[in-house]
Amino acid sequence: MPQPLSRSLPENLAYLQKSFGASGDFYAKELAISGIRCAIVMFTGLSSPEKLCHLALEMLDRDPVMLGGSEGLCDYLLTQSLAPAEPRPVEDWQTFTRMLSNGMTLLLIDGCAQAVMFSTQEMPQRSIGTPSGEGNMRGSQEAFTELLRNNLSLLRRQFRSGTLVAEIATARTRAQTEYCLCYDSRLAPRETVDALREQLAQIELPVLLDSAYFASFLKQDKLNLFPAAAYTERPATACARLCEGKVVVLVSGCPYALIVPSFFAEHFECLDDYASGAVFAGLIRLLKYLAFLLAVFGPGLYVMAVSFAPEIIPVQMLTKLARAEVSTPLPPMLEMLCVTLLLEIVREAGLRAPQSIGHTVSLVGALILGETAVSAGIVSVPVLTMAAAATIATLAVPSLYEQSILFRFAVILLAGAFGVLGVACAALVILAMACGSEPFGYDYLYPLMPLTRTTWRDGFVRSIWSRLAGAGEVIGRHET
């Protein structure tokens, strides 16, 4: 049960002093408004003292007789004053603390068990920049920031329909982090919105720093490696998903939006697909699918072919591969695993290192270590070439990077241990994971499987805009 505010101003100030008195950014000032004792409370880093000064000056000119005491002052500020006061008062300490942390200024009135909130937010923030992880040549170049209200305004500016609903809630965390559920009330299936709202409300976390924290709780099968949701830092992409009837989840402090439900084919799409010609966009999309297959199965197929099925390799290439493998001390499976691990270490070091030396780390790892390992005879050139090609192919589908790495290691191990049977089993397990994933009751492989007209309209390839515009792809309206 939330603890209510006291009618005594000294008691309320004593409670605040006990709770926040040691904080350097806590600000509390007693003053009299029309002869009534009051106190202004705020965090100086989140609220603007200049805005507060203008509010106080406007209120000091009122006649105490006309206000009718403490209750009259509170009612006047809530219903009649021109000051930007919120329409609802604060009556308990839990809400009081949350509003303070949101940058609100609160006015305590002696003799009144309610506090009045004023919108005086002036939080330091990062300016709206360009997306760093989703490169596109055309379309909007705005990216989400860390402020929830800013992100919501960016989304509403792109999606100007009156059917856009934004439900702000507080997560069950110690930090009381806010998140927002955004959806089109006309397009989004009601059962999907209700199920997602209920799941998010039940999640308990010690801290919520990223929208991805929610993703693992949305999975039906925890062992399934495919993601339960997609992420984007582009308001334009989030707007496009809203038009498909999906739900966008924004989390305070996170510059990425969570999109639910997510389908496998969406990881191979981007804004440029719809800004380019249909033929070129279809070619690029097919190349991305081939890149994903190369990233997952390329190294494993090489190990399988060299160790168990050399007859499928052309004679001239087999001779060169045999010479390269003879000069190295490790078998093909261990050799491929070592090179793949080395490339992942180089990538991780370049990503986590300070920006000033990140490129140097990547250059040293990729060129010097690779060249040295080949010259010393530790690894062969074909193995290094295949591992590097798989690593580059992984970057063509960045949203499936984690899954590509995990699948790649599994395929290499199974191919080195069981040959053709191991590769076949790995492929079947990956396909079973994709087919077994049903985010909120929808087919994860839609529109790729089952094969329908939608598969060729906006699946493996993209059709011309006249057909896409007439179809109007919306989840829950799958075409057979």
Image: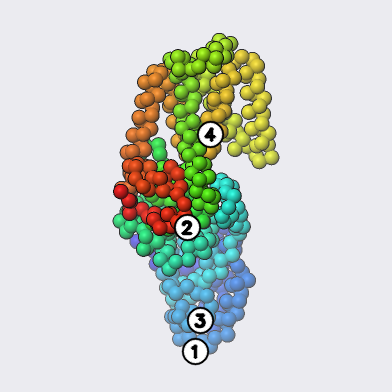
Which residue bears the numbered disc 3?
Answer: 81
Mark 2 vs 4, N-terminal side: 2
Neighbor class of circle 3 (other Cα within 10 Å; few <14, some 14-19, many 20+) is: some
Q: In which quarter of the image is residue 473?
A: bottom left
Q: From the top left corner, tell me how far across and down residue 3 is, in percent.
A: 39, 64
Pointer 3 with pointer 1, Cβ within 8 A: no
Amino acid, disc 4: Ala
Residue 202 visible at all: no
Q: Which of marks 2 and 1 is in front?
A: 2
Which residue bears the numbered disc 1?
Answer: 65
Rounded to the nearest angstrom, the CA distance separating label 2 from label 4 is 28 Å
Mark 1 vs 4, N-terminal side: 1
Mark 3 vs 4, N-terminal side: 3
Mark 2 vs 1, N-terminal side: 1
Which residue bears the numbered disc 4?
Answer: 393
Which residue bears the numbered disc 2?
Answer: 239
Residue 435 visible at all: yes
Amino acid, disc 3: Ser
Mark 3 vs 2, N-terminal side: 3
Pointer 2 with pointer 4, Cβ within 8 A: no
Q: From the top left corner, tell me how far across and down residue 478 is, in percent.
A: 33, 51
Q: Nearer the viewer, mark 3 or mark 1?
A: 3
Neighbor class of circle 2 (other Cα within 10 Å; few <14, some 14-19, many 20+) is: many
| In this picture, residue 467 sits left or right of residue 345 | left
Front residue (pair 145, 169): 145
Q: What element carries label 1?
A: helix
* Above or below 47: residue 128: above
Rounded to the nearest angstrom, the CA distance separating label 3 from label 4 is 62 Å
Amino acid, disc 1: Val
Task: Name the residue rendered at 50%, 51% in the picture.
Answer: 274
Q: Is mark 3 on a helix, strand or loop?
A: loop
Front residue (pair 348, 381): 381
